[in-house]
Image (tube, rainbow, N blue to C red):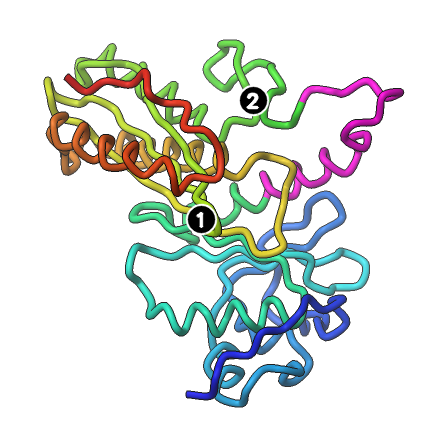
Amino acid sequence: MGQMTSTGPDDGSRLRPLAAGRGPLLERGGHVVHTTRRLGELVSGRPPGITGHQWSTAGRATLDVVVCDGGTGRPVFAVEFTTPAAEAQREIRMRDAVYAAVGLAVLRIQSATLRPGPHARRVAEYLIDARGYAAGMPEPGDPEAEQPVGFRDIVGRLPDGRSGHVNDLGAIARAAAVEAYVARQLVDPIVRGLHVRWTNGPVEGWAWAEVRPGRCLVERVLLWEHRFSCGVDAARLAGDLAVTAIGEHLRRIDAREPDLVPRRDLGRDFDRLRSRRGEMAHRFDFDHLTFD
């Protein structure tokens, strides 16, 4: 393999409009959303600083969601869904090198449960709306501007009629947990969670719900941001996506019980996480949690 070359971010001029063909997934907020496109379709030739081997390998990689400008058709950002240990790290690094070389913003979502088929549309809608909201916010620290409520903190009416954070991707799953508790399918109606940001690494979100006494349904989601931001803290977004993954299991709990983790094992995992606080980019705010 050719040696990895460090490349600075490009201005995006090598990103080309997606060719007409199969229809888009949706149009929203001045954007057109496509699914399942090869990276090579988005880039005009091998970028400078990328070896031939890097380009031939990365160019074949599939992006699950590509959000394009509705006017020019050029890619604005993309989303990848991956599973734990799904790919060799060197292939991911080659792909990341191309992203950096052409200035493509990418959000990578790693989850054992979330998949592009059932989740691509909702995630794309959320990210487009969040970015649009953030674009209208005043500059941070402007003393003359009233700081509005952040996108994730907007309160309104939820689908179940309650008042809550309408831009919490896990809101439907949280409501489903309450319904499952009423139906005696869970022993606790609350989906709990935490999130951390690793220094020079991904952000990580955990969510869990106690299904049987001492046995929990657990989901973990990791996010990597490559030149990407939607105005919602990525660690918080990872936590919300982990709750969303819990909701996928709750939808099928009538048909089959999901794999459960003993609460004591979850506690040991939490202790290992807490012991790594020195590797975290921000203060660890979850010392109050117990799994006794």
Residue 251 highlighted magenta (yes or no): no
Secondary structure under the numbered disc 1 in the rendered image: loop
Direction from residue 14 to residue 87 in the image, left or right: left
Relative to 282, say whether 22 is above or below. below
Q: Nearer the viewer, mark 1 or mark 2?
A: 1
Mark 2 lies on a secondary structure that is loop
For label 1, the crowd category at 10 Å Cα-Cα, with few meaning under 14, some 14 to 19 and many 20 or more, is: many
Find disc 2 in the rendering and name its residue: 166
Identify whether 65 is placed above or below 3.
above
Q: Return the mark for residue 202.
A: 1
Quick check: is 129 in the magenta stretch?
yes
Q: Which residues are magenta?
A: 125-149
In the image, residue 216 sits, relative to residue 65, either above or below, namely above
Residue 41 % position (x, y): 60, 76
Q: Position of residue 277 (x, y in %)?
A: 36, 35
Residue at 38% across, 26% down: 173
Which residue type carries mark 2?
A: Val
Q: Quadrant of the N terminus?
A: bottom left
- Foreground residue, 16 or 55? 55
